[in-house]
Image (cartoon, grey):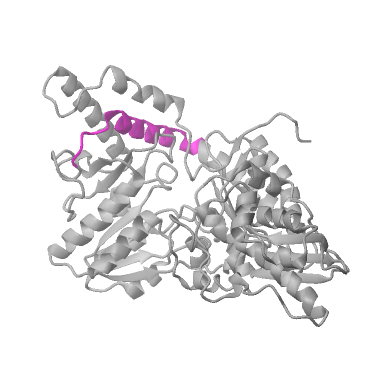
Amino acid sequence: MLYSDKVMDHFNNPRNVGVIDDADGVGEVGNPVCGDVMKITIKVDDTDHITDLKFQTLGCGAAIATSSIVTEMAKGLSIQEAVAITKRQVAEELGGLPPAKMHCSVLATDGLKVAVDDYLKKHGREPIAGEILSENPDFDPHAEEEEAPVDTSANAEACHLHE
Amino acid sequence: MMSDTPRTVYLDYAATTPVDPRVVEAMLPFFTERFGNPNSLYALGRDAYRALEAARESFAANIGAQPAEVIFTGAGTEGDNAAVFGIAHAGRARGKGNHIVVSAFEHHAVLEPVHRLEKEGFEVSVLKPREDGIIHPEDLAAVLRDETVLVTIMHANNELGTVQPVRELAALTHEKDGYFHTDAIQALGKVDWNAVDLGVDAASFSAHKIYGPKGVGALYLKRGTPFEPMLIGGGQESKKRSATQNVAGATALAKALELMIEERATENPRLEKLRDRVIDGILQMPNTALNGGRDVPRLPGTANLVIKGIEGESMLLQLDNKGIAVSTGSACSSGSLEPSHVLLSIGLAPEIAHGSIRVTVGRFTTGEDVEYLLEVLPPIVERLRAMSPVYAKMFGASS
């Protein structure tokens, strides 16, 4: 398994690490049992554009790199554009991810979606992010893999459910 | 302070070892000059045959076996597979029952064959080690049956380095007329290993863990042990493993073991000192713990700890940036969603097991290497903990 140079760059020099104290929206997804948790805080201006993002991630190289790049990708976007970022786009932006690591990019896009919805809810508005993939009990993080082993044990099952 | 010169510090000797130059020297003639097939009758073949048998005699003598009880193989995994399938099938055919006992923290080279036998209809008892990383004989006694055909328990665990009471476990198995196999791949050369003294029926070994090349190993099969070969063909290795023998590899394996035994009296205490320095150094960081008991029998070079609140793969990558090679039991390092089955088997919670680090020192490790690790690791851990959204919540703010 090899990481691309861009993954390693974002892993070694993650952008936008930290917490925005007066954040307009907060998203926390993942589960320590599964080894990965991501928290993202965002600032949104009065035209619904994301002006700043910071993240904290407990996780592997891919989890940190996808968190980092998603903060770069979303900066300056409208909240509608931000929630439309797909895990595939995140992976492509990083120059690809190993098959077994594709689910890490789900965590990054989900964290962003939850933060946007949190912002909307705080303002009494309807959520727009739609399904939070990693919170769906049927979510299979290995769905797009071709070679990774399928693990059906109890802990692996629990890890399909990011709380 | 850290210098700017890039350095490589290899601390993963349980994964593999560099081939000792003395071993390389011993095996070289068999590639280009003494290249004969040991099964050919002419002079070149006889020369290769004599070399092969000299390697067998040396290796057998060094494990307390008869030469006829040593089968050269192509890998440690092959020996494990051959022993588990070969003894279970042949033992059952000979009238033993169809019950197998396997420890929960075996290498996958043993676990997967046992799983396949279970699908074939064998009954399997999975024996858990205790928190200290040891399979206690009374726990084996509780699951043995009259129908038990095979018990397979590794001699030294590859992740923890804990050494199992193989003599007692084998004796208990024999009380039920079962056969006892041990995966001795990590133990070979590091502990005093004598087949007769231990009383095992089968054991698998590998060369590349003891400064020999990859792709060669051996299976000890006590005379009279039922065995159905996996590889059939030309009938080499007393029909137990057909294939033209790897004379260079067998020579290397024998030489590698000779060197391990020759140097053990001075090398083991040296490694224990380095290992204990690693353990004590890592334990100085907050929220860390040793995996497996400290006072149980352990390999001299293996240290396995948890560094709570981090994920092992990211630590491994950061250490790699500094030229240090170690391993981890985190899920992400394996490509599955589960952390190490070994760490879970001794009772670690998954969220703790994700932060494990295994450091194994060996023949070419120096005190400087260990100090370099202990200098580089704490800032990496601090940085990763600071980046975690849950570290403070889970383990308190201090890092």
Q: Nearer the viewer, residue B299 or B12?
A: B12
Quarter of the image holding residue B44?
top left
Q: Nearer the viewer, residue A68 or B204?
A: A68
Is B53 displayed left or right of A98 in the figure? left
Is B205 displayed left or right of B13 in the figure? left
Residue A110, placed above or below residue B370: below
Residue A153, placed above or below residue B302: below
Main SS, magenta residues: helix
Specify whether residue B272 is painted magenta. no
Give me the residue at 40% from left, 54% from top: B155
Quarter of the image holding residue B365?
top right
Is B236 displayed left or right of B306 in the figure? left
**Residue B132 percent location from the top left of the image:** 52, 64
**Residue B233 percent location from the top left of the image:** 14, 42
The magenta segment is B242-266
**Residue A7 percent location from the top left of the image:** 64, 47
Residue A25 visible to the viewer: yes
Specify whether residue B259 is painted magenta. yes
